[in-house]
Amino acid sequence: MPMIDADGCPINVEVAGSDSAPVLMLSNSLGTNLHMWDDQMAEWTKHFRVVRYDRRGHGKSGAPKGPYSMERLGRDVLAVVDGLKIKKFNWCGLSMGGMVGQWLGANAPERIEKLILSNTHFNYPDKGPWNDRIKFVQEKGVMALFEPSMERWFTKGFRENAPQAMAHMKEMFVTNNPVGYIACSEAVRDMDFTASNPTITVPTLVIVGSQDPATPPAAGEAIAKQIKGAKLVAIDAAHIANIEQPKIYAETVLNFLKS
């Protein structure tokens, strides 16, 4: 699959499904790669040409020194779709992917058919926890962050009863480039969509995890209130809802996109 240049940074992209189908673009969380969506691919490629990619700083994409910004990450997406000659696309982004989606919805509405913002936030007024996380990774590396991250990302029951899924997450997480992880963390820390979200006019679905401590339901509820006409759906999961509830998640997305 192609490597697409985004202002000098190579972005790793995978495309699956019929070339004649409408496009669904997927964007993963901080600390994972495009394989976060593996469980949904079989179902979604029946209906869509699915484009997924490794965000800069992640997976097989380049990891130039940061900090990055949500605008930079949003322009990477536009470079990808331009490189693939895609004019309009549906967007499904989880966690950090939902943050990039908020930037796209406000700044590139002519490119978006429908917008799905999942398990995400719009602003962190208190920068302290993100500064602490950045310092932690600088001092101890990404591997040391794995266990505390999994405690936020998945319910206790899922962590104990889904060893294959947890092994898959570990494989993605521990291979993170610390430079890219830190630069993306800085983008999350500094984002603020308070003023721009009310300008979003594309059809929007906000998904929250009812047991999500990382981006609590209240954050998603606030986003849904900011965007006129946005729909809100809760899934019984923690943060990485598409892995904890793969079938329900796939159906929720399809129901919105095909409505």
Image (cartoon, rainbow, N blue to C red):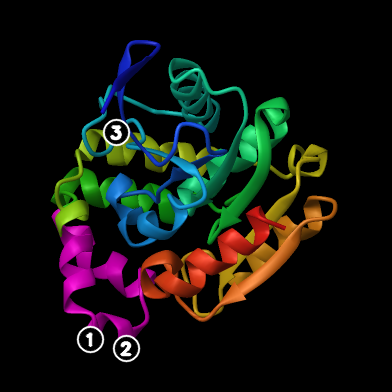
Q: On screen, 80 above or below 28?
A: above
CA gap, disc 1 to disc 3? 30 Å
Which residue is more in the foreground, 71 or 34? 34
Question: Which of the 4 image quadrants contains residue 86?
Answer: top right
Amino acid type assigned to the residue bearing label 2 in the image: Gly
The residue under label 3 is which amino acid type?
Gly
Residue on which the image places disc 1 = 160
Quarter of the figure with the N terminus = top left
Q: Residues within 10 Å of mark 3 (few under 14, many from 20)?
A: many
Q: Nearer the viewer, residue 135 or 168?
A: 168
- Residue 126 image offset from top left, x and y in percent: 55, 53
Q: Which mark is residue 57?
A: 3
Q: Main secondary structure of the magenta part?
A: helix
Image x and y of residue 211, in percent? 50, 80
Q: Which mark is residue 119?
A: none
* Marks 1 and 2 in Cβ contact (< 8 Å): yes
Residue indicated by mark 2: 157
Q: Which residues are magenta?
A: 143-170
Visible in this render: residue 108? Answer: yes
